């Protein structure tokens, strides 16, 4: 039987398995986090360390850093499972592949998206954001990183197993990620300016929900095509 | 049955023949409309009281921008048709759309920036519609990049079809998200309720140019799609018969 219940249970098993595997190799999924921190630290060095100027740049710096770092992390999403054949097993299991890929993307977000969210308040403070802005910065990146992981999953599935897939992945994913970047940076800018930021946050939430609904379906289709 | 024409178009020999017959018609009509539109727009239309003669670049810019969007829609529609009905000809059409659409996008960007220099005082501004057009170019480039990166033709067709559909879902979102900023670009003058804010001597040539560009797009698309069909069907027997005939 392959009802929605058994697919849901399989998805939970998959989450446990992926978490176990990832925790054995913390170095791999901590690298995007290191990248995010370094990129953010480079901006004050390249511009100048004047806090009022950095404060104006902070939303852009944080969001472009988060976007690039999530792009870098996408290679970890399907590559290993595609190489050792476990992805193929998922595809022929008779369970809904979209559910299983949603589970994999959840784990991927927990390991590479959530750390960015958690470290962002620290970076925002270093860039001159006031303490009252930090919840807003956190909320914007929380919603935005979920959407980024889901959109990225489509790109990762499409470029699965391609040689020189990295630059192509960037070319495919970055235009699709523009709305997240725009609303995310907008929300962060309002948070730092201590203005109401519900509007862009709602839009970010809507993007995350839309991506959660449609992206796994597109990714499942793409994975099936890639495995043929 | 009402649908037989649709299924017949899915057959490569039939498509090849029909497309070959349509190309000269579309091409001739496109040439007539564009020549008429250019004479009407560049010679007969009065100069603008604010922009002088410089506004005349819209007779190329607006049709190119319209077609850049339309070509993407046609590409996504053809790709979806291919994905749903497993129609090889539809994939050939989708694959042929991308380079043409990308060229229209580049023409729209270049003519827009040439117009922007005297009118806005700068070649490029970070205006929502310019950014949308630029991102559209990247969507085209991503589509073509994905196609060329996958060696196996069937997989390239289906994977790029998914990307085209994802892109067409995203395009309005991208457009409205970049619309967030205040726009420097002027609003629509043609497609709005009520009368256009231009005299007929200005907008009639523009409409002629837009339809001329559409027919030109259709003609070039069919020529390219015929080439794609030839490449895909290079081992088929009907092809030998066709080549034997002519």
Image (cartoon, helix red, strand yellow):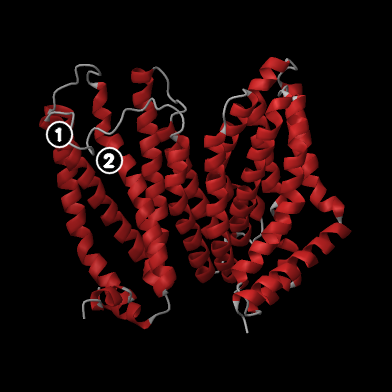
Q: Which residue shows up at 66% across the image and 71% down it?
A: A8
Work out whether residue B39 can be spotted. Answer: no
Q: Residue A79's image quarter?
A: bottom right
Q: Chain of mark 2?
A: B
Front label number (1 vs 2): 1
Q: Is A136 displayed left or right of A209 in the figure?
A: right
> Can residue B126 be spotted in the picture?
yes
B24 in relation to B68, above or below: below
Q: Residue furthest bottom?
A: A1
Q: Secondary structure at mark 2?
A: helix
Image spot of residue A184 (x, y percent):
59, 37
Foreground of the two, B131 or B42: B131
Q: Nearer the viewer, residue A50 or A20?
A: A20
Q: CA distance from mark 1 to mark 2?
A: 20 Å
Chain ID of residue with mark 1: B
Residue B103 placement (x, y as % from top left): 39, 45
Residue at image point 57% right, 28% down: A196
Q: Which mark is residue B195?
A: 1
> How many other residues sit within 10 Å of disc 1, few (<14), some (14-19) or many (≥20)?
few
> Tags 1 and 2 in contact by the CB under 8 Å rule?
no
Label 2, residues with CA under 10 Å away: few <14, some 14-19, many ≥20:
many
Give the mark, 1 or 2, whose residue is nearer the N terminus.
2
Say if labels 1 and 2 share a chain. yes
- Residue A198, percent across and down? 55, 35
Q: Which residue is mark 2?
A: B63
């Amino acid at each position: 039987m392959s009802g929605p219940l058994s697919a849901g249970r399989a998805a939970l098993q998959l989450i446990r398995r992926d978490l176990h595997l990832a925790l054995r190799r913390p170095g791999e999924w901590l690298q995007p986090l290191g990248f995010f921190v370094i990129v953010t630290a480079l901006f004050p060095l390249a511009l100048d360390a004047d806090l009022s100027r950095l404060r104006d740049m902070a939303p852009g710096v944080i969001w472009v850093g988060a976007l690039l770092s999530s792009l870098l992390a996408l290679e970890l999403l399907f590559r290993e499972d595609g190489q050792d054949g476990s992805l193929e097993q998922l595809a022929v299991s008779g369970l809904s592949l979209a559910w299983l890929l949603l589970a994999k993307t959840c784990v991927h977000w927990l390991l590479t998206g959530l750390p960015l969210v958690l470290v962002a308040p620290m970076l925002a403070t270093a860039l001159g954001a006031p303490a009252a802005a930090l919840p807003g910065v956190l909320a914007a990146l929380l919603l935005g990183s979920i959407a980024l992981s889901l959109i990225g999953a489509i790109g990762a599935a499409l470029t699965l197993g391609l040689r020189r897939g990295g630059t192509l992945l960037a070319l495919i994913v970055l235009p699709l990620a523009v709305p997240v970047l725009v609303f995310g940076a907008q929300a962060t800018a309002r948070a730092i300016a201590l203005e109401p930021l519900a509007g862009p946050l709602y839009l970010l939430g809507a993007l995350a929900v839309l991506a959660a609904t449609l992206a796994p379906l597109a990714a499942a289709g793409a994975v099936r095509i890639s495995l043929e | 049955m009402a649908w037989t024409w649709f299924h017949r178009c899915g057959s490569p020999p039939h498509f090849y023949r029909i497309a070959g017959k349509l190309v000269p018609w579309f091409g001739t009509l496109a040439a007539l409309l564009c020549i008429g539109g250019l004479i009407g727009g560049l010679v007969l239309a009065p100069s603008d009281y604010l922009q002088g003669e410089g506004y005349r670049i819209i007779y190329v810019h607006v049709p190119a921008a319209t077609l850049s969007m339309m070509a993407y829609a046609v590409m996504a529609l053809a790709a979806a048709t291919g994905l749903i009905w497993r129609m090889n000809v539809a994939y050939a059409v989708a694959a042929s759309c991308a380079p043409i659409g990308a060229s229209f996008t580049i023409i729209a960007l270049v003519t827009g920036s040439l117009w922007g220099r005297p009118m806005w005082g700068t070649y490029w501004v970070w205006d929502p519609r310019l950014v949308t057009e630029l991102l559209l170019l990247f969507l085209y480039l991503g589509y073509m990049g994905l196609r060329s990166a996958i060696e196996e033709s069937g997989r390239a067709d289906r994977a790029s079809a998914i990307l085209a559909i994802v892109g067409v879902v995203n395009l309005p979102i991208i457009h409205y998200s970049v619309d967030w900023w205040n726009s420097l670009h002027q609003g629509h003058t043609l497609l709005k309720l009520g009368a256009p804010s231009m005299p007929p001597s200005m907008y009639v040539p523009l409409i002629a140019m837009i339809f001329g560009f559409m027919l030109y797009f259709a003609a070039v698309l069919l020529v390219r799609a015929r080439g794609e069909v030839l490449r895909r069907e290079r081992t088929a027997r009907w092809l030998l018969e066709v080549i034997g005939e002519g």
